[in-house]
Amino acid sequence: MYNNIPELLRKEAVQRLFATNTFNNSWIIWKPEIQRILGDNFDENALLNLGDFLTQIFRTTGTSGRGQGELSGGGAAWESLICWYINLCTVGSRIVAVKKMSLVPEPIRDAITVNYGNFGCNTESDITILIFPNLPEYTQDINTLNIQNNQNQELPVLNRNGKLNLNALNFLASRDFQQYEIGIIQCKTNWNDNAQIPMLWDMIYSAGGFRGRNITIGKNGYSIQNIHQFTYSFVTVPSNQNQNYSSNQVAVKRVTNLSGGNYWGQPTEQHVAKSIKEIFTNNFNNGTSGIRNGIRNAIPKFNPNQVLSYFDII
């Protein structure tokens, strides 16, 4: 179950989070707080409900009395925490969250490229969500796979270092492109100063570009218009912790109609923001047969020396 292509990519994505000083230094403080919130003998509900506490967890690396721009680790730490949480809750599924764009298959990167004239730029994609097609190549153990390219040459799933062979992943993403689903998540610690950014990017993607202004989406024949589903979401701390948000505020209105919704790391507040734990059923339901079932089955595997111990939650 945990030796297929999505799970190999998930492991690589999470391990790369821990390879950064920002995440590692924060994790020293976050891990005890996460364990305190979960308690002993936690179940799938406790893990999923961590989404209601991510703001609280993130703020443990701040200093009392300091401003919103001085939270330890800043935006990179928040992005990493969200990426870790989404992967934690989607183990055993075809949903994978990736922070490093270099791990995203080339056809997917091409599809989300926005072109302004001859200049191609990447979106503000802090986290890219891949929902792999429900095909044997993505659900079966890699030891049973025989992937051949268009020249009938075998493409090994693993490279010499035992990591996922991205050439094989690029080939599959090209072959099965129309069956993929993509989610882009923009993460910001500050809501007030950044709400207009996801609003404008979502407008561009939803409109399919603006050809009259020579703004197009996609390259090399890949476009989000040709995939199964695309969503754009916003996830904030928010670091403006002394502010009470309401549905009438400009910052809230700017992200109300995003295709993927707006979320934060605390319980849902009606007409303001949903808890990040709601993003799974809202946007990624096609990639799983049940989030809670997947988490429940995975819990024993989080123990040290088990296949999912790389999450470092126990």
Image: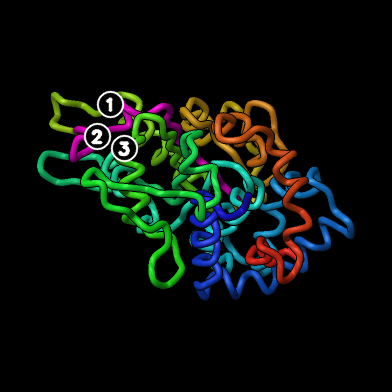
* Location of mark 3 (residue): 175
Report the amino acid beneath label 3. Answer: Arg
Which residue appears at 55% of the width and 69% of the height? 18
Q: Earlier in the sequence, mark 1 or mark 2?
A: 1
* Location of mark 1 (residue): 208
Q: Position of residue 110 (x, y in %)?
A: 26, 43
Eyeballing the image, is 250 above or below 20? Answer: above
Q: Position of residue 152 (x, y in %)?
A: 26, 47
Badge 1: residue crowd in 10 Å (few <14, some 14–19, many ≥20) = some
Q: Quadrant of residue 276?
A: top right
Q: Position of residue 28 (x, y in %)?
A: 68, 74
Q: Position of residue 68 (x, y in %)?
A: 56, 59
- Label 1 SS: loop
Taking 195 as reference, is 60 left or right? right
* Location of mark 2 (residue): 217
Task: Tell which tag, 3 or 2, sits nearer the viewer.
Answer: 3
Q: Which residues are magenta?
A: 216-238
Q: Answer yes or no: do the residues labelled 1 and 2 have beta carbons within 8 Å?
A: yes
Give the CA distance from mark 1 to mark 2: 6 Å
Residue closest to the eye, 188 or 250: 188
Report the amino acid beneath label 2. Answer: Ile
Q: Is residue 220 magenta?
A: yes
